[in-house]
Image: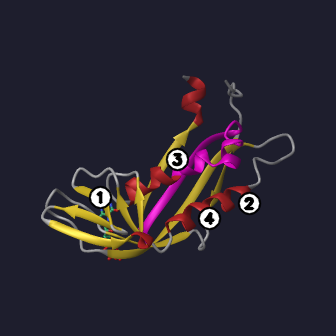
Amino acid sequence: METLVADAILTRIEISKDYLNFSSGHFTLFSATERENLHGHNFRVRCAVTAQVGDGGLTFDYVILKRALKVLCDALDERVLLPLESPYLRIERQDGLVLAHFADERIPFLERDVLLLPIRNVTIEELAPLLLERLRTQVEIAAMTAAIRAIELGVSSGQGQWAIAQWDNRAQAIA
Ligand SMILES: Nc1nc2c(c(=O)[nH]1)N=C([C@H](O)[C@H](O)COP(=O)(O)OP(=O)(O)OP(=O)(O)O)CN2
């Protein structure tokens, strides 16, 4: 297990790029009987990584991070996002369709237009941890996590509203 360097100065690298976005459809589920109508957002993603600057004056090549974040955004872009783990929505595949069953509604989508996500609701607070976990497990990022102390990943559904998920390596190193 990596040992923390006592009172090391940590530096936070923040990435916020206009091209880190995905335009997707969704509807928020508020209860077993209340939901929004299907609509879309230009979701935005931003990220901050806290790390120790190495002897060479570098934490990590943030181009690798930007590339990994773009891969995450592109995977969700131009799809209708549906939650696989909602207590209120049942998903069925039938004859090339994805059928979302909500209350007494049967909502059909073409397979090609839908992306099923392992989350409980398509909210920014469910998307942020999902994308953070996907980021952490991308090979090139996983290789960097020994030098990384913490990662924050934010998802926004509109100007001025963000959900920020956090992962802190220090908790693991201390445990
Ligand atoms: N806790 C949450 N509440 C809501 C979420 C969410 O992700 N987490 N999401 C929604 C819907 O996506 C809704 O469509 C958001 O709409 P709105 O806030 O109006 O989005 P705008 O960008 O249009 O915001 P304006 O303030 O109107 O500019 C609802 N609740």
Please name the colour scheme applied to the rendered image. secondary structure
4 and 2 marks in contact (CB < 8 Å): no
* Quarter of the view holding residue 115: bottom left
Q: Can I make out residue 71 in this image?
A: yes
Name which residue lies at 35% across and 62% down.
82
Q: Marks 3 and 1: which is nearer the front?
A: 1
Name which residue lies at 21% across and 66% down.
35
Q: Which residue is mark 2?
A: 63
3 and 2 marks in contact (CB < 8 Å): no
Quick one: label 2 or label 1, which is nearer the N terminus? 2
Circle 1 — which element?
strand
- Rate crowding at label 4 as few (under 14), some (14 to 19) or many (20 or more) other CA atoms within 10 Å: some
Residue toward you, 153 or 127: 127
Is the C-beta of the residue carrying label 2 under 8 Å from the nearest atom of ligand 1?
A: no
Inter-mark Cα distance, 3 to 2: 19 Å
- Magenta-highlighted residues: 132-159
22, above or below 6, in the image? below
Residue type at mark 1?
Ile
**Residue 113 coordinates in the image, percent (x, y):** 42, 73
Quick one: label 4 or label 3, which is nearer the N terminus? 4
Inter-mark Cα distance, 4 to 2: 11 Å
Inter-mark Cα distance, 4 to 1: 28 Å
Name which residue lies at 29% across and 68% down.
27
2 and 1 marks in contact (CB < 8 Å): no
Q: Which residue is mark 4?
A: 70
Quick one: label 3 or label 1, which is nearer the N terminus? 1
Is the C-beta of the residue carrying label 3 under 8 Å from the nearest atom of ligand 1?
A: no
- Rate crowding at label 2 as few (under 14), some (14 to 19) or many (20 or more) other CA atoms within 10 Å: few
Q: Which residue is mark 1?
A: 91
Q: Which residue is mark 3?
A: 133
Circle 3 — which element?
helix
136, above or below 108, in the image? above
